[in-house]
Image: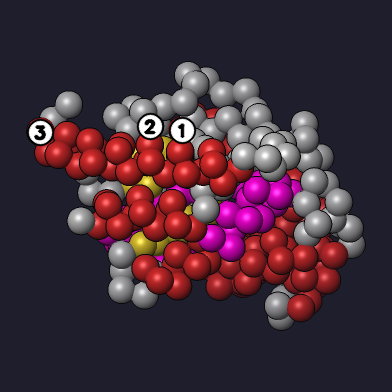
Amino acid sequence: MEPQKQSISIPVAIVVAGALIGFAIYMSGKPVNAPTAPTPGGNPTASDVKINPVSSNDHILGNPNAKIVLVEYSDTECPYCKRFHETLQRLMAEYGKDGSLAWVYRSFPISSLHPKAPKEAEALECAAEQGGNTAFWKYTDKLYEITPSNNNLDMAQLPTIAGDIGLDVTAFNTCLSSGKMAVKVKAQYDDGAAAGAQGTPYSVLITKNEKIPITQGALPYENMKEIIDSLLK
């Protein structure tokens, strides 16, 4: 390991380990339904995360040149993703305004657990095609807000959300029914698998010097804040 990376990785690893202990305590006594998906190579370390570079093709909230870019792989029907979505909204409100943190959303629908999730992921892309980055995030936020999770969303809600955020519902339905966004969703899923995602939510924190995987899913706000604060030092 290069000296520059070592000076950053060791304290962050300690913070991450502490966060995981706290997470284990937090989750004790709670039902666990962690989704899994086959991926190559198992959980990666900070030195070997294989992730596609963040680009203008991504759905980015915040400054793309932020000190920390969090790439999240998420399944819209995953209850833990729903919880983590709220955590990331809170973190962006705290760290996004000054360019310390940016949030990149990539779909990772686990169809074996949530058969509706792939089509919902396509709906996100149809919103983005019509209304750009702003519409993508409005649609995504609303979808996470209303879904009861675990494959229980009424799919008739997808065009309703489109109308609620000001999109052309007819054009949205045409896009969704065509299935043309399935290729985009599959590419994001494949990227997540290559990056080490074995369930959702799965995140990779990207700094100037390294890529740090968060493999334990929906870490609480306090734990994520501790990790981010350590990286910003």
Residue reaching furthest top?
Answer: 41
Q: Would you name the residue on which mark 3 appears?
A: 3
Q: Nearer the viewer, mark 3 or mark 2?
A: 3
Q: In the rendered structure, which segment of residues is drawn in magenta?
A: 59-87
Q: Would you name the residue on which mark 1 appears?
A: 195
Q: Residue at x 59, y 63 (%)?
A: 86
| Quarter of the rendering containing residue 128 | bottom right
Q: Residue at x 89, y 58 (%)?
A: 154
Q: Residues within 10 Å of mark 2 (few under 14, many from 20)?
A: some
Q: Nearer the viewer, mark 3 or mark 1?
A: 3
| Membership of 78 in magenta stretch | yes
Q: Amino acid at mark 3?
A: Pro
User: In 3D space, how far apart are the residues under numbered discs 3 and 1 (Cα atoms)?
Assistant: 24 Å
Q: Earlier in the sequence, mark 3 or mark 1?
A: 3
Q: Position of residue 97 (x, y in %)?
A: 36, 75
Circles 2 and 1: CB distance less than 8 Å? Answer: yes
Residue situated in front as seen by the camera: 198 or 216: 216
Q: Would you name the residue on which mark 2 appears?
A: 49
